[in-house]
Image (spheres, rainbow, N blue to C red):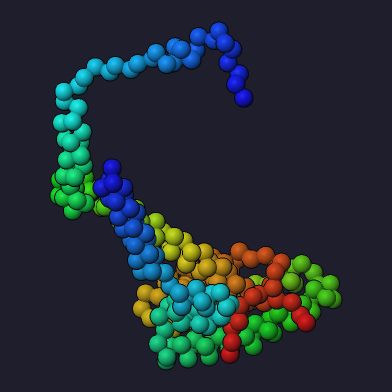
Amino acid sequence: MNTSKPDDPLPRTLADWRVTPPRDPHFRTAVWSRIEADRRAPSWAGYVRMHASLVAGALAIAVAAGGLIGRDQARARVDAERATMVSSYVQSLDARTMRMP
Amino acid sequence: MKNLLITLAVALAACGAAFGVFYAMNDQPALRQAAHEGDAMAWLREEFHLNDTQFAAVKKLHADYNVVCAEHCTAIAAAKKRGASATEIAALEKTCVDAMTTHFRRVAALLPPGQGERYLAMVLPRVNDYDHNGAPTVQVKS
């Protein structure tokens, strides 16, 4: 389906359109230097060596946080079960709370 | 960027590992198991680190006290049934509380050093802090 009119200037404009970007003499060098930079990116071991204190700090914080949360959760769980147990234990020996069959 | 993400992943893994280790170190599965099953004797054994001799003595003490406790229970129930005065019921309940307290002190005396005080600190505050709703759920097996 041809929708253009015979006097439509658009096709002629498009046909005449030429892109003439300015020449960049460093384009090729820049591309290769970026490829080279990626190729030379440090391994994780190298990254750790380069940022030793930062990585060590992050790991220390992670271990401390995990340890504290783990300890508190375990203790809270044991304490809750203990409290329930003690109440039930005392109640089981308390004649006031017993019911005759 | 990739290295930063790896570092974060390693930190997260370290956090999870530390959580697991510290949770396991502070958990008391045997104690929780006894509590979960409502087995008071098993709980006492685990909680207060009883050896076989101490456990046998504590168990016998509880068995003996169960008889006393049942007598008190019968007396209180009978008094309530016949509509005894509040004073009489209070006196019976006081007898029960005194017997219970004496029993707890006897149990505490059988526990390892240091554990008796801990036991009393747990149970005595609950002697006067009871409600009449809810039947006992633990098993004090003889």
Residue A20: % across, % down? 29, 16
x, y percentage for residue A58?
A: 27, 48
Q: Nearer the viewer, residue A86 or A16?
A: A16
**Which residue does the image show at 38% across and 14% down from the upper left?**
A17
Name the one closer to the observer, B137 or B96: B137
Q: Residue at x 17, y 47 (%)?
A: A42
What quarter of the picture does the C terminus of chain A occupy? bottom right
In the displayed structure, B62 sits above or below A49; it is below
Vertical arrangement, residue B41 with respect to residue B26, above or below: below
Residue drawn 74% across the image and 77% down it: A99
Q: Determine the image quadrant of residue A90.
A: bottom right
Residue at 55 percent across and 7 percent down: it is: A7
Residue A24's x, y, as percent? 20, 21
Residue A53 visible here: no
Question: B15 or B1, which is in the foreground?
Answer: B1
Q: How many marks?
A: 0
- Classify the position of the N terminus of chain A by image quarter: top right
Is residue B85 visible in this depiction of the protein?
A: yes
**Corner quadrant of residue B91:** bottom right
